[in-house]
Image (cartoon, rainbow, N blue to C red):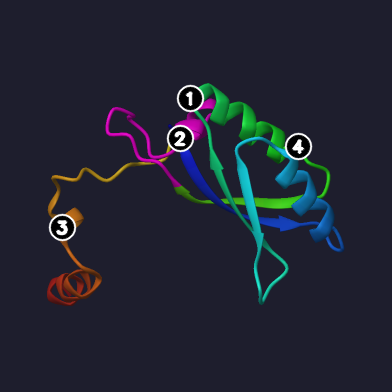
Amino acid sequence: MPVCGYVAVPRPGEQTSLQGELSDLAGCEVVAAENSEVLLLVTTTSTFQEDLELRRRIEGLPSLEVLLLTFGEIDPETPVGDPLAEAKGRKLPMMDPASPAANTTPSQTRTLREESR
């Protein structure tokens, strides 16, 4: 079951309209940010195809300025980080969980960079 999180930026003056349009779509839960004119959106669908169709509907909303994917379910059987990106001709790299970089914390990464200088 694909679950995705987004930041939705409305066109100027369209936040209320966009929030209503998103709330009307099945599989969408939307909340207005308290300190900014953006919306936080979580989508849940049953299949990859439903997720693709829902994203296309969201991207086509007239009151939407920008849609930023902040979280997408990661399926180890999927060869790209964002399977919907492949449908648009983009391919995002996905970190191999077995690589040494995957098991480091930000402070360890900083130390590794400093040692390599």
Label 3: which residue? Answer: 103
Instruction: Give the Cα distance between marks 3 and 1.
Output: 30 Å
- The stretch drawn in magenta includes residue 35: no
Q: Earlier along the polypeptide chain: callout 4 or callout 3?
A: 4
In contact (CB < 8 Å): disc 1 and disc 2? yes
Disc 4 residue type (three-letter): Gly
Give the left or right position of residue 48, taking residue 34 as reference.
Answer: left
Instruction: Give the Cα distance between marks 4 and 3.
Output: 39 Å
In front: label 1 or label 4: 1
Where residue 60 is drawn, which disc sits there? 4
Disc 2 residue type (three-letter): Pro
| Other-residue count near label 4 (Cα within 10 Å), few / some / many at <14 / 14–19 / ≥20 | few
Badge 4 marks a residue whose secondary structure is: loop
Disc 1 residue type (three-letter): Thr
In front: label 4 or label 2: 2
At 87% from the left and 63% from the top, the residue drawn is 13
Q: Earlier along the polypeptide chain: callout 1 or callout 2?
A: 2
Label 2: which residue? Answer: 2
Q: Earlier along the polypeptide chain: callout 4 or callout 2?
A: 2
Instruction: Give the Cα distance between marks 1 and 4.
Output: 20 Å
Q: Earlier along the polypeptide chain: callout 2 or callout 3?
A: 2
| Other-residue count near label 2 (Cα within 10 Å), few / some / many at <14 / 14–19 / ≥20 | some
Label 1: which residue? Answer: 47
Query: Which stretch is magenta?
Result: 72-89
In contact (CB < 8 Å): disc 4 and disc 3? no
Instruction: Give the Cα distance between marks 2 and 3.
Output: 25 Å
Residue 29 versus residue 55 in the image, above or below: below
